[in-house]
Amino acid sequence: MAGILLGIGVAIVEGMATKVGEEGMGWVLHQIGIGGDESNDVGEELGQIEDAINGVKRELKIDTEKILKELKVIEQQQLYQAWETRDTQLQKYITQINVQYSRFLDYAQNPKTTSKSDVENLVQEILDTNSGAAISLAEISTLISGSGADKGVLELYREMTAPIIQDGKIYARQGINSYFQYYMNAAYAECTALYLLIEAFHFQNNRPLAKKQFEAYRKYAYNQENPFISNLQYLMRAGCTSISLFGGKLFKSDEKVKSRQDYWAQAYFVSGYDSNTVRAKAERIFCNSLALSKSENRIAINMVYDPWTPQDVNSVLIPIISASKENPVDILPSREDEFTFPGVEMGNRGGYSGVAELKLRRMIYENVPGDIYRMKDLNNTSGLENQNGSGTKVRYFQDPKYLQNTFIVNTGSRHNSMDFRSFPHQRKFV
């Protein structure tokens, strides 16, 4: 289990993915092979990335040790063993990539003392059909997502960690951060494998295969999207299960209050909208792993609702519109996914008791022009009419606090996101 929970940080994933995706990268080995030393600056930059990774590992050390201690408590249990078996396979392929990348980094930092035969041998290893970077990349992707009856490591990791959160042994924040770091550790290895493959194919002057490998990488990444997002929601839910929203019980800590805010998109708790939520961080992490090019922008909107929402909401698509132009054109999502998660006990109020099942409708907008955006106001449209709540409070499909939120995408920040809690009608326990 070497390296468990020791991730690399959002900034590092972003930096690596950006370098992989941009035009003109992947020529370090080529320059060394022809006797040039133009790669020296790139080698120094890659060395700085490695130093930053080590810095992040040191920062995570305290939380990592606490979580690992709690995981060891259940070492003999089936959940731990099921995850450990798959994780051992994952670490094997990550190690294979790291060994090749370490040699690449050494060559990049020392081009004048690296021979062409050294580079040729490394390229052969990278492209090996049994232990090369392409094999490792494919296997890591399968282990993350799962295949057939075999659960992915993210699902197994969630199943193992959620009970620790529910039992109060760690805060939800700690469990979620460890989940993020675990995913980023694997995602960084995938980005590194792609980088190595692009280097190897460019060394062979085979640009078409380099491009083809990049396209294959993107398919792997997209296959990991729903498992990454879905398992996160279960961890968020674990932070709520010991809390009663109604029924007179007090919240026991700020951490648990934050868990409720994040899970229900701040619907019950704050007057304004704060986009710095768990879901926003997850969207940022995943987008960083996509290696978006300079010409790509991506926005994600997560609509949170429950079984009391009218059925027609399941087909509602939220357009985004420019917040900087007059008479903006509607932009509909490129695709949407819907998830359903088990309920959280809501206590008893006004004759109602039971659990509040959460549904998450996730809408993705891809290749949108650089601009400032916001959600289009759909209040009082068919099936989404405003309702009277308790007292004089109005229940909107989209609360004004959400509609006022804007998000920017451009060449400097190519992805953004938000989540909102929909109230299409009055609920019995309001």
Image: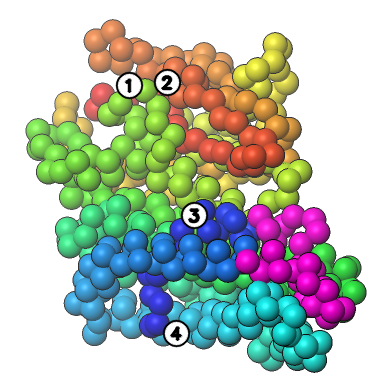
- Residue 370 percent across, percent down from the top left: 70, 32
Q: Quadrant of residue 382?
A: top right
Q: Which one is earlier in the sequence, the residue at label 4 or at label 3?
A: 3
Residue 183 visible in the snapshot: no
Disc 2 element: helix
Disc assigned to residue 271:
1
Q: Are marks 1 and 3 in contact (CB under 8 Å)?
A: no
Q: Identity of the amino acid at label 4?
A: Thr
- Magenta-colored span: 18-44
Disc assigned to residue 10:
3
- Rendered position, 404 above or below 360: above
Disc 3 element: helix
Q: Are marks 1 and 2 in contact (CB under 8 Å)?
A: yes
Residue to which mark 2 is pinned: 401
Which residue appears at 47% of the width and 50% of the height?
282
Quadrant assignment for the N terminus: bottom left
Q: CA distance from mark 1 to mark 4?
A: 46 Å
Q: Identity of the amino acid at label 3?
A: Val
Q: Which one is earlier in the sequence, the residue at label 1 or at label 3?
A: 3
- Residue 145 percent across, percent down from the top left: 54, 68
Q: CA distance from mark 2 to mark 4?
A: 46 Å
Q: Residues within 10 Å of mark 2 (few under 14, many from 20)?
A: some
Q: Identity of the amino acid at label 1?
A: Ser
Determine if the magenta segment contains residue 236: no
Closest to the camera, between mark 1 and mark 3, is: 3
